[in-house]
Amino acid sequence: MAKIIILPTMGKSGSLEVPEIRTDLLMLTKLAGTPLGPTPTAVDRALNGLISGKMKDAEFTGEQGQHLLVDLEGGSHPAHPQRAILLVGLGSPQKFCGKVACQVFRLLIDQALEKGIAHVTIPFAPNRMTVSSLNLKGTAHILREVVEEKLSGRKGARASLKEIQVLCTPQARKHIQEGLDIPSRHKSVCCVD
């Protein structure tokens, strides 16, 4: 079973230092009808606009269910600290809820397993526009539920995912840990009908 670890970090001006994080797969999100948030913008800047260029080519707007996988190993950025970036649309901020978070995490785990990825990093950004719909504790609990449900019974090559890093501010660590500590109910994951 993949371990979920919390990696508190704080950069200049209170931002997460995501562009420097070494990982196989970095998940970033985008809300529909809004520009890229501070974390995806920082990563895009570090990649000289590669993400925004791919978004334009794919007509990616951040609608719920949209996703874009950017492979960095085979392109012009092989020295970048991430092997790949998964950009996932969250849809409208007003419609964001636990079910959407569940679907996003299920997509992430499916992509990681399909690509044979061992390490995934998920930034839990400060000052999120979705905080009124789902707090950090609830988000972390949903993540754990999805990971347990998706990886239960997988062995060998099908269980390539070893570690999921949750990148957050030091202040958020306690809330995320509380969510991870909630007893599992993965037989009834929120978005599985």
Image: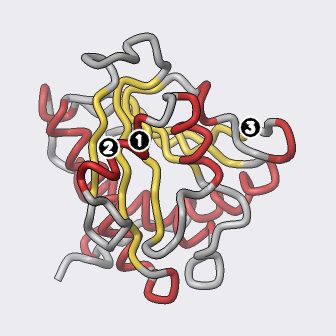
Residue located at (13% from left, 34% from top): 158
Q: Position of residue 62 (x, y in %)?
A: 38, 66
- Tell whether label 3 touches label 2 (CB within 8 Å): no
Q: Position of residue 192 (x, y in %)?
A: 20, 76
Q: Position of residue 32 (x, y in %)?
A: 43, 73
Residue located at (40% from left, 17% from top): 77
* Residue highlighted by disc 3: 9
Which mark's residue is nearer the viewer, 3 or 1? Answer: 1
Residue located at (57% from left, 29% from top): 46
Question: Which callout, 3 or 1, points at the residue further toward the start of the chain?
Answer: 3
- Tell whether label 1 touches label 2 (CB within 8 Å): yes
Is residue 3 shown left or right of residue 76?
right
Q: 179 and 125: which one is in front?
A: 125
The quadrant where residue 182 appears? bottom right
Give the secondary structure at mark 1: helix
Q: Residues within 10 Å of mark 2 (few under 14, many from 20)?
A: some
Q: Position of residue 119 (x, y in %)?
A: 39, 30
* Residue highlighted by disc 2: 54
Question: Which callout, 2 or 3, points at the residue further toward the start of the chain?
Answer: 3
Give the secondary structure at mark 3: loop
* Residue highlighted by disc 1: 51
Residue located at (72% from left, 52% from top): 173
Using the numbered discs, state the Cα–Cα distance from disc 3 to disc 1 in whole angstroms: 23 Å
The quadrant where residue 148 appears? bottom left
Q: 140 and 77: which one is in front?
A: 77
Using the numbered discs, state the Cα–Cα distance from disc 2 to disc 3 in whole angstroms: 28 Å
Above or below for 128 versus 163: below
Residue type indicated by callout 1: Ile
Residue 150: mark: none
Location of the C terminus (image quadrant): bottom left
